[in-house]
Amino acid sequence: MGREGAVAAIQMQRVGKRFEPRHADGLAYEALAGVDLAIGEGEFLCVLGPTGCGKSTVMHLVAGFETPTEGRVLVAGKPVSGPGADRGMVFQNDRALFPWLTVDQNVAFGLEVAHRTPAAVRAAVDSNLELVGLTGHRTKFPRELSGGMKQRVQIARALATDPAILLMDEPFAALDAQTRRRMQEELGRIWAVSRKTVLFITHDIGEAIWLGDRIAVMTHGPAARIKEVIDVDLPRPRQNMTPGFVSLYNTLDASIRAESEAMHNA
Amino acid sequence: MPDQDRAHPGNAPASPPAASQQRPRPARDLTRSPWVPVLVVLASLILWELAARLTIPILLPPPADVAEAFWKSAKDGSLFRHIGASYFRILTGWFVGCVIAIPFGILAGRLKWVRAVLDPFIEFFRFIPPIAFVTLFMIWFGLGEVSKVGLIVYTAFFTTFLSTMAGAMGVEIERIRAAQCLGASPRQVFFRVIVPGTVPHIVTGVRLSLGLAFMTVVAAEFIAAESGVGYLIFSARLFAQTDFVFLGILVLGVMGFVANSILKRLLARIAYRYDVNL
Ligand SMILES: Nc1ncnc2c1ncn2[C@@H]1O[C@H](COP(=O)(O)OP(=O)(O)OP(=O)(O)O)[C@@H](O)[C@H]1O
Ligand SMILES: [Mg+2]
């Protein structure tokens, strides 16, 4: 998707991240080294990699929760200096919801901190609840929802402020197969309408093929980097088990498996 | 209980598996009956009366003697004066202590350097019961209300502060990050995430310190007071009026029960939203 001359929505340039020891017996850990990655505007990029390789760390750097110890992370051409409303985040964990707020209050949070008018808040809450199919549950508290519904609240909440970039860290990992399937379809539909830039972490190869324009595979840690970036040259809407799907699946599977094995032998 | 629903073999339509049969019979839940506390109180009174007959009133006065002590002190109004004095000290001290403790507890929970400064003091004072300061407070603040209320302020402050601080420290990082990604400023994160995220711990601290305030007030009134339920108990002891000692103890229990019930009722408004068990 690299349109010539256009500034990439997200750019990681030779990014390294080293965690310093937090206690006397701790060791410093170099999680990332030399991560290069560019994500175009409106692109859906999936990241795959062996467990513990540093996928979440990559996302935390883009979100601005952590700062790189080497290299630069640019969003819309400017270095990231902290979290902001331009990058909406969907966390893997539903602890990210505010349990003392109802569904609609959770979705309204970002609009209210931006001091939007009550009418604008209401309109954005209504349309996003509609989008994720939670209109009938708007006055419930998060603890009264199922796991899949909680993830949909997170998605509605992240979309309500209309961020240019959506960061999603294994958002469907905790869901059962059926719900996950439906959520993937919904996300594909939402993305097709909104054309946001999406950075999507997953360990599900099928999910990555289903959703991604491109798929980045990471090496194992320590000092993980981007091993390869593969274009998903399949027509949308994607279909399961077409020859193209299967061969791409096998390629990715072999690539990640090689990394996992290398990690266990190290 | 496998295969219970095989009772009608063959032609029973595929009913939802055993659900209807296994639903527990709506057995009456005795623990929820309003009669249980009434019966318990009655039984205790009977036991008390029986026990009193085995000994002399100065050791264990029978219920009737205590009831008489109640009437006597109720008629001349002294009982209500004592109750009022103790309630005033408890509620004023508790309220002031909590109101100071909550903001400081939240700040201490969130600011590393505040915690670093306070930590040695906290670790030292947490092992000293407030009652140990009674005499010192008398010397510093005199024998009037200030010393007694001040001691309860200290009691409530310390307990509520520790609980609030623990709560503020434990606010989930994901929640803070989620708010930041939604555009919340540090100030908005504080008031919209940290403060509400600490509410369950504040509730715990506030309820705990109300109980401790009752302990402290009695100790303070033992040592220097002309009024209060603690004074009632202590002065009765001097004249060997065991019935009045009992009266004081029972009154304390009722006062605590009433105060706690009112507090619970006030907190019930927010309990569901903040998922706190009362
Ligand atoms: N705050 C931290 N302090 C020290 N080490 C950390 C910290 N955060 C992450 N790490 C280390 O960095 C490495 C990468 O962690 P990260 O959470 O990014 O992995 P991941 O690829 O997201 O794993 P998973 O697939 O299991 O979610 C791990 O070895 C982890 O122990
Ligand atoms: Mg992760």
Image: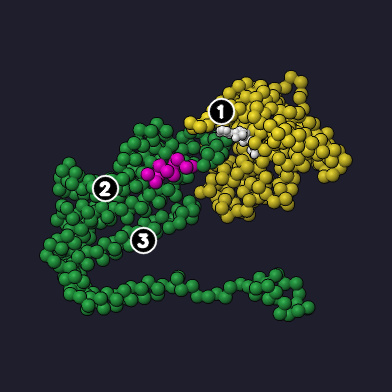
Chain colours: A yellow, B green
* Location of residue A223 with respect to B20 vertically, above or below: above
- Against A83, is B126 above or below? below
Co-location on one chain, circles 1 and 2: no
Cα separation, mark 2 vs mark 3, equals 25 Å
- Mark in the foreground, 1 or 3: 1
Residue hosting label 2: B130
Above or below, comparing residue B20 to residue A35 in the picture: below
Examine the residues drawn in magenta and state their main secondary structure: helix
The quarter of the image holding the C terminus of chain B is bottom left
Residue A28 image label = 1
Q: Is residue B167 magenta?
A: yes
The local crowd at label 3, few if under 14, some if 14 to 19, many if 20 or more residues have their Cα within 10 Å, is few
**Residue at left offset 23%, top offset 75%:** B52
Give the residue displayed 58% in from the left and 55% down from the top: A144
Residue underneath mark 3: B261
User: Magenta span covers which residues?
Assistant: B162-171
Give the residue furthest to the front.
A265
